[in-house]
Image (tube, grey):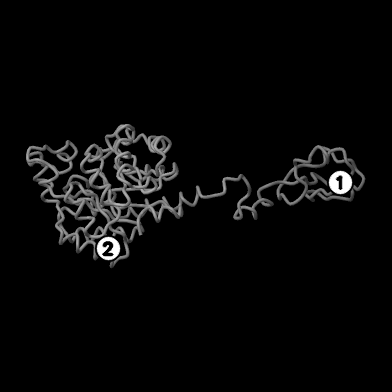
């Protein structure tokens, strides 16, 4: 089932656990990441599909965060990525393991060959990374091959996002099958740079489903994004944040991923009400306990005038409401009342 088919049910936010390259080129790590994603209860686990030679030139330098997070400023991007490639055989095993574990697999393709490969293995959904949003040949090929796309928009202006969207639509992808994720491409993203309101701007201006791909530390921002209307959340996770590699530092560890999923599911329930301001079913039983009634302040004889001297307001709330105070004051007691008796009219 494609991600948009699930999303149309509007029952829950689609949560994508981004394993990415946090397997460090080790298939055993990749299997362990799948196990933890299943335990956390996410909807999809996502890897990255690329050929390093097709992705970067031998002269491409690593980003500052990649140098900082790998602890190695001497090797190139190409050398780093070669160690993180997943082979076709690796993909075959990961697909089979995901099917066995009952979790949906998909991937980000970073080059033309990888786009074709993911289509060949039966995927109808592809993730477009932020770095490819200005790559016209890539966007056109993705649009020709896939029925559904999720597009990350780190480093982008709204005009660049709109231009990519127009490429997809011109190639025949239905707008309803496109989800655009607000994103910031810094690992980790400083909180002051999140600019979460931009997610809603994308939705308002472009009329597409939106979500959020998060690179901040912690789980607060994805939860906030759900409260603001995100239909898809993507978050990097790792077996251990102290492992060497470009993305581990800005990733959740397994228990944090599990906590994020639980929090998002709670937020979904909290914002799924009718929107009417009325007592909920769970609190009806507390109305009489928490509210107050007009009661006798002291013993009152039948026929005596009720006044601020002999009546007051106390719990429980199963008598005359204090909102009727003005109509009670000045009336005559219909019977004898002892102190704390509910006043009757």
Return the x and y of residue 178 as percentages of the image width and height: 35, 46
In which quadrant is the N terminus drawn?
Answer: bottom left
Return the x and y of residue 187 as percentages of the image width and height: 24, 40
Question: Could you classify mark 1 by the number of other residues whose Cα lies within 10 Å: few (under 14), some (14-19), or many (20 or more)?
Answer: many
Q: Quadrant of residue 326?
A: top right
Q: In this rendering, is residue 28 above or below 235?
A: below
Helix, strand or loop at label 1? It is loop
Between residue 9 and residue 234, name the one nearer to us: 9
Task: List the single residue furthest toward the bottom.
Answer: 100
The answer to whether mark 2 and mark 1 are in CB contact below 8 A is: no
- Mark 2 or 1, nearer chain start: 2
Q: Quadrant of residue 27?
A: bottom left
Helix, strand or loop at label 2? It is helix
Return the x and y of residue 140 as percentages of the image width and height: 24, 44
Return the x and y of residue 139 as percentages of the image width and height: 25, 43
Label drawn at residue 98? 2
339 left or right, relative to 47: right
Q: In this rendering, is residue 95 above or below 15?
A: below
Between residue 12 and residue 243, name the one nearer to us: 12
Label drawn at residue 113? none
Q: CA distance from mark 2 to mark 1?
A: 76 Å
Q: How many marks?
A: 2
Between residue 143 and residue 320, name the one nearer to us: 143
Q: In this rendering, is residue 184 above or below 316?
A: above
Where does label 1 land, which residue?
300
Question: Could you classify mark 2 by the number of other residues whose Cα lies within 10 Å: few (under 14), some (14-19), or many (20 or more)?
Answer: some
53 left or right, relative to 180: left
Which marked residue is nearer to the observer: mark 2 or mark 1? 2
114 left or right, relative to 13: left
């Amino acid at each position: 089932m494609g991600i948009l088919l699930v999303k149309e049910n509007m029952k829950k936010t689609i949560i994508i656990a981004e394993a990415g390259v946090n397997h460090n080129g080790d298939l055993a790590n990749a299997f362990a990441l799948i196990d933890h994603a299943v335990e956390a209860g996410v909807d999809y686990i996502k890897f990255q599909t690329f050929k390093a030679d097709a992705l970067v030139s031998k002269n491409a330098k690593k980003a500052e965060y990649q140098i900082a997070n790998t602890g190695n400023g001497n090797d190139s991007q190409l050398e780093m990525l070669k160690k993180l490639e997943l082979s076709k055989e690796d993909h075959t095993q990961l697909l089979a393991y995901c099917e066995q574990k009952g979790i949906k697999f998909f991937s980000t393709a970073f080059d033309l060959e990888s786009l074709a490969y993911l289509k060949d293995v039966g995927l109808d959904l592809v993730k477009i990374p932020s770095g490819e949003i200005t790559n016209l040949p890539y966007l056109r090929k993705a649009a020709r091959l896939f029925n559904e796309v999720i597009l990350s928009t780190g480093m982008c202006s709204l005009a660049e996002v709109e231009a990519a969207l127009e490429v997809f639509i011109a190639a025949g992808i239905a707008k309803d099958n496109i989800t655009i994720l607000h994103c910031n491409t810094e690992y980790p993203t400083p909180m002051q740079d999140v600019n979460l309101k931009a997610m809603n701007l994308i939705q308002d201006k472009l009329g597409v489903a939106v979500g959020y791909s998060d690179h901040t530390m912690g789980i607060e921002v994805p939860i906030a994004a759900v409260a603001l209307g995100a239909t898809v959340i993507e978050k990097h996770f790792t077996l251990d944040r102290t492992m060497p590699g470009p993305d581990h530092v800005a990733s959740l560890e397994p228990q944090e991923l599990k906590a994020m999923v639980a929090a998002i599911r709670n937020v979904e329930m909290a914002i799924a009400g009718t929107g009417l301001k009325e007592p909920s079913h769970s609190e009806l039983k507390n109305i009489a306990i928490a509210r107050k009634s007009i009661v006798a302040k002291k013993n009152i004889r039948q026929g005596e005038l009720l006044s601020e001297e002999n009546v007051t307001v106390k719990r429980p709330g199963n008598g005359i409401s204090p909102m009727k105070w003005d109509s009670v004051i000045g009336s005559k007691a219909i019977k004898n009342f002892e102190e704390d008796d509910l006043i009757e009219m």
